[in-house]
Image (cartoon, rainbow, N blue to C red):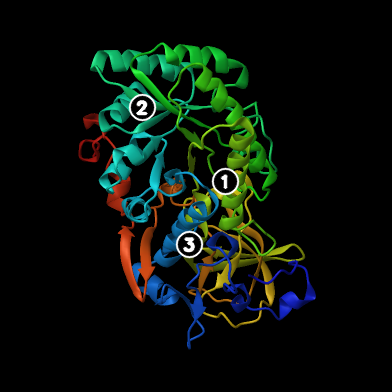
Amino acid sequence: MVSILPTDHPADQILSSRHYLPAGDRAPNQTLLPLTAAVNAQDHLVIGGCDVPELVQQFGSPLYILDESTLRTACRQYRQAFKRYYPGEALTVYASKAWSCLAVCAIATQEGLGIDVVSGGELHTALQAGAAAEQIYFHGNNKSLDELQMGLEAGCRIVVDNWYELRSLTQLTAQMNQTATILLRLTPGIECHTHEYIRTGHIDSKFGFDPEQLEPVFAYVSQQSGLRCIGLHAHIGSQIFELQPHQDLGAVMIQWFQQAIRHGLPITELDIGGGLGICYTEADDPPSIEAWVQTVARGIADACAAADLALPRLLCEPGRSLIGSACVTAYTVGSQKTVPGIRDYLAVDGGMSDNPRPITYQSSYRVLAADRMSAALSQTVTLAGKHCESGDVIIPSAALPELEAGAVVVVAATGAYNYSMASNYNRVPRPAAVLVNRGEAQLILRRETLADLVRQDCLPAALNPSKLR
């Protein structure tokens, strides 16, 4: 595990970036850096056998660097843990909103995972990556009619969130003479300690049917020949370190399961969502993937035994804990500014356009000097982005060595919700991404060009520059 030291500890002055390398038998979600992270003879950070400063020289920066081994290890830990702790059938479904692109979805599919999508774009990506339709679960609280039709035509499982979607699907299945295979998303009313924007299980949430709606919802679905309801879904939030809420969720869902059966619904699946947290800083201490799986599997199995029910097919939907720690973002240092008696700013060539989480969620991160891994962390700086926004700060208090312009730094644990929430703010092109493994780096996302930024622009004829001269 990483060193656990408060950032104001005097020992910080003698620590180096090496102290944050993975150590011991830890799950991928419990490490700051990818499992393959190491330091070479040049004192450079190496990931997947690739020298990070050399990757920046070859592909430019900012650069997302995704370690294939760490991602595959996390996928396998989920699958193996369910085999070990759940007596029935189980399926791990990758929540692709964390990072949806062809390469990531293809890896998850190769590892035997299903794909959770929340838009037509994510559904298209999953299908193009080779995911089987029956292994795709289509979520979202306001799917358009076009998206619902797309899901029906593809043959994926549609997770119905509300009455609008229920009635829309009823109409579409009649028009298309098809049957929709659905799950119902329910709000369990379980609170957990996380940011208010990523809590989705409490009653005051835009997601899912409220518990008092269950009887009319089950009654309605049981009367629709075009709807085949095979399961129930619930999700209590994201970046959760507590296990008890997931234990509680199992008991709640089995009660709903019994209600659905009494209405004659052919329920065979329970989807308990995801939410397991990861390490963003050395202070974070999430449970392992195995401990999380053991908790949810035992919760469902015990609740079924108490109710004398056969075990359902159990689904979970991890996103962040699969891919968050598998990726780092590399930046090149640029300008520096000292405000006497207040702070020192160190600016990099990216920021809120490639990582909007700090400005959105006040998220914390750890930065390392990729080309000086053994250098003492001798200064505390505010790591700032390049955007025209005062709040574009990646890390307010970052411990780093003395660095000059051109140095390469990496921000750890940027695999989840960085690329997928990236923007072109200030008309900054989105970064490239490479997949690294055994000393080879393969491009999985091309860096956007200036031409890409204006590709969708439309210039009315009257505004054509040639006519304004």
The amino acid on which the numbered mark 3 sits, given as a three-letter code, is Ala
**In-front residue for pair 253/152:** 253
- Residue at image position (60%, 74%) is 24
Q: Disc number at residue 460?
A: none
Label 1 to label 3: alpha-carbon separation: 25 Å
> On the rendered structure, is 172 left or right of 39?
left
Counting labels gives 3
Badge 2 or badge 1: first in the primary sequence? 2
Residue 314, image x, y percentages: 49, 40
Badge 3 or badge 2: first in the primary sequence? 2
Q: Which residue is mark 1?
A: 297
- Residue at image position (56%, 36%) is 235
**In-front residue for pair 459/102:** 102
Residue 256, image x, y percentages: 57, 25
Residue 115, image x, y percentages: 39, 44
Q: Disc number at residue 326?
A: 3
Badge 1 or badge 3: first in the primary sequence? 1
Q: Are marks 1 and 3 in contact (CB under 8 Å)?
A: no
> On the rendered structure, is 422 left or right of 149?
right
**In-front residue for pair 259/119:** 259
**In the rendered view of the protein, which quadrant contains the N terminus?**
bottom right
The amino acid on which the numbered mark 2 sits, given as a three-letter code, is Thr
Q: Which residue is mark 2?
A: 181
Q: Residue furthest front?
A: 308
Label 3 to label 2: alpha-carbon separation: 33 Å
